Image (tube, coloured by chain):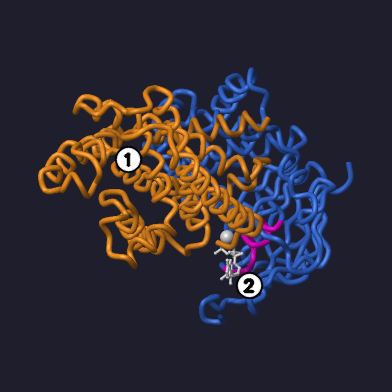
Amino acid sequence: MWSQEVLALSRRWLLMVLRERLNLLFSVLQPAVWLVFFAGAMGGAVDARIVGTGDYVAFAVPGVIAFTVVGNGVSAAMPLLFDKETGYLDKLLSMPVRRGSLIVSRFVFQVGMNSAQVLLILLVALALGVRPATGVLGVLAILAVTGLLTLALTAAAMALACAVPSHGTFFAVTGFASLPLLFMSNAFVPLSAMPGWMAVVARLNPLTYAIDAMRLLVLRGWGGGVPVSLGALSLASGLLLALGWWQFARRTSERVA
Amino acid sequence: MGLIIETAGLGRAFGGAIAVDALTLAVSPGEIFGLLGPNGAGKTTTIRMLSTLLPPTTGTARVCGHDVARRAGEVRRHIGYVPQQVSSMGHYMLTGREKAEIEAALYHVPRRRVQARVSELLELVQLSACADRLVQTYSGGMQKRLDLACGLLHRPDLLILDEPTLGLDVQSRHHMWDHIRSLRDEGMTVLLATNYMDEADRLCDRLVIIDHGREVAGGSPAALKAAMGVSSLDEVFLRHTGHALREEVG
Ligand SMILES: Nc1ncnc2c1ncn2[C@@H]1O[C@H](COP(=O)(O)OP(=O)(O)OP(=O)(O)O)[C@@H](O)[C@H]1O
Ligand SMILES: [Mg+2]
C-alpha cells in the first residue's frame, strides 16, 4: 500500500520532468559545462600547492557535484509549492495517502535523478582524465554521500515550501541561501586557503563534510578523513531530516490556505 | 447505515473571524444535500472541515460514522472530494488517463484493477476519446468532468462537490447534473456546495442556506418555497440573506 503510494507519486514527478525535455536537457548539461569551462579555466589560475593537487579538475569534481545537488535541492520542493498554490495539495490531502509518502516519493525521485546526474559528472570527469583513487567502490561511496545530502536538502526545501506564504518568498529565501551555502564551503577553495573566520563558518556547513569525503575518495583513498567526514555528514543530515520531517508533518496536519 | 454526515455545533474561526458558526447538519444515505450561501458564507470552509483538511475549532463532525478530527484516515477512505478549483495546473504535462491512474493508486484501488476502473470512469464522463491528451489542453468542462471521475475512483460513500458547475456551459451543466443524479440513484450520498439556485432546485433533496457561517434556513426546495409562498428558490434565498453585497457588510 505504502509502496503503491510512493510509486504512483514518483510516477507523477517523473512524467512531469520527462515532458519538459528542454528543461531536463539543460539541467543535465549544466554540471558538465561547469566542469569543462569553470574548472578548466580556473585550473591555470590556481596554485597546486594550495589545493593539494596539480589536477584542479579532479579537485573541483566534488564541488561541482555539491553545486548540482544544492541546485536540485531547491527544485525538489517545486511540485509541492505549485500543488499548494493551485489547490491540488488539498485534493491530495483529502485522499487516504500517508503524509510521509509525499515526502518519501520526493526523496526517491530526487535521489534517483541526482544519482544519474552524479554518474554523468563522473563520466565527464573521466573523459577529462580524472580517475577516482578509490575506483568503483569509491563511486558507490560518492553516491551514498550525495544521497545523504539529497535527503537533507529535500527535507529542508519541503519544510520551507510548507512554511512560506507563496513561491515568491520561497525563491527569495533559497536564492539568498544557496550561493553563500556553496561559497562558505570548501567547494572550490580548500579550508586552509580561506581567511580564518570563513574557515570556521565553513566547518559548520554540512556541505563541507560531504565535499571533504568526496574529495578524499577522488584524490586520495579510503584513509583517515573519510569516516570522520561521513560521520559528520550523517549527523547533520539526520538533524535536517528530522527537522524537515517534523515541519512537514506539522504543516500538513493542519493546512491553512 | 446511520447518518452519512452528522455535525453538532461545528465551527471554525480564523484568528478572531468566525467563518462557520455552530452548524448542525444531518445528511442521510442516498441524499443529494445542498450547501447554499452568499460568497464568503462559509461553504468551502465547512467542506474543508468535512474533508479533514481543516480541523474544527468548535463542535464535532462525523462523516460515515468517523470523527473528522480523530479518525481522519478513516474519513478519507470513504469520501471523494472534488475541489472548487479545477486541478489542471497541477497536471499540466499529464494526460487525463495518467492523472486518473495516479489518483486511483493513491486511493488504493488494487493494482490490477486500476486500468479497468480508470477506463470505466473516463467512459462514464465521456472523456475516453481524449484520455491520452494532456490535461492542459482540456476545456473547462472537460477538466471538471475529469475531476468528477477522479472523485469516484474508489467508489466513495460520500461525494463532496464544491461548485461542480462553476463556469460550465449549459450542455455541460446538464450533463453534470445527470451524472450526479445517476450516482444518487446508485445509492451514493452527495454533498454539494453551489451558488446556483436553479442547480440546487433541480438536484437537491434537501439543503441548508448559510449566511455569515450560520444556518438561516433548511429543508427541501419545495418546502422552502411553499413556506414563503414563492415560486423560485432565488426568492427564498434573497429573503433569507438580504440584497446587500457581502463585501459591503464585511
Ligand atoms: N485560510 C483562511 N484564513 C482566513 N480566513 C479565511 C480562510 N479561509 C476562509 N476564510 C474566511 O472565511 C469565510 C468563509 O469563506 P469560504 O471560502 O468558506 O466561503 P464560501 O461560502 O465558500 O464562499 P464562495 O461562494 O465565495 O466560494 C470568508 O470570510 C473567508 O474570508
Ligand atoms: Mg467556496
Q: Mark 1 points at which residue?
A: A62
Q: Where is residue A241 in the image (x, y as percent from the top left)?
A: 56, 49
Quarter where residue A31 is shown: top left
Using the image as rendered, state which of residue B146 and residue A8 is in the foreground.
A8
Subunit of label 1: A
* Relative height, residue B243 to residue A217 (above, below): below
Q: Which span of residues is magenta-colored?
A: B40-49
Q: Identify which residue is drawn at 67% across, 27% down.
A: B109
Dominant SS type (magenta): helix
- Which chain has been coloured orange in this picture? A
Using the image as rendered, state which of residue A73 and residue B11 is in the foreground.
A73
Quarter where residue A33 is shown: top left
Q: Badge 1, how many Cα within 10 Å: few under 14, some, many 20+?
A: many
Q: Badge 2, how many Cα within 10 Å: few under 14, some, many 20+?
A: few
Q: What residue type is labelled 1?
A: Pro
Using the image as rendered, state which of residue B227 and residue A126 is in the foreground.
A126
Q: Name the residue under label 2.
A: B14
Q: Identify which residue is drawn at 43% across, 32% down.
A: A222
Residue B140 visible in the snapshot: yes
Ligand 1 lies in which image quarter?
Answer: bottom right
Q: Label 1: state its secondary structure.
A: helix
* Relative height, residue B182 to residue B230 (above, below): above
Q: Position of residue B29 (x, y in %)?
A: 81, 43
Question: Which quadrant, please, contains the C terminus of chain A?
Answer: bottom right
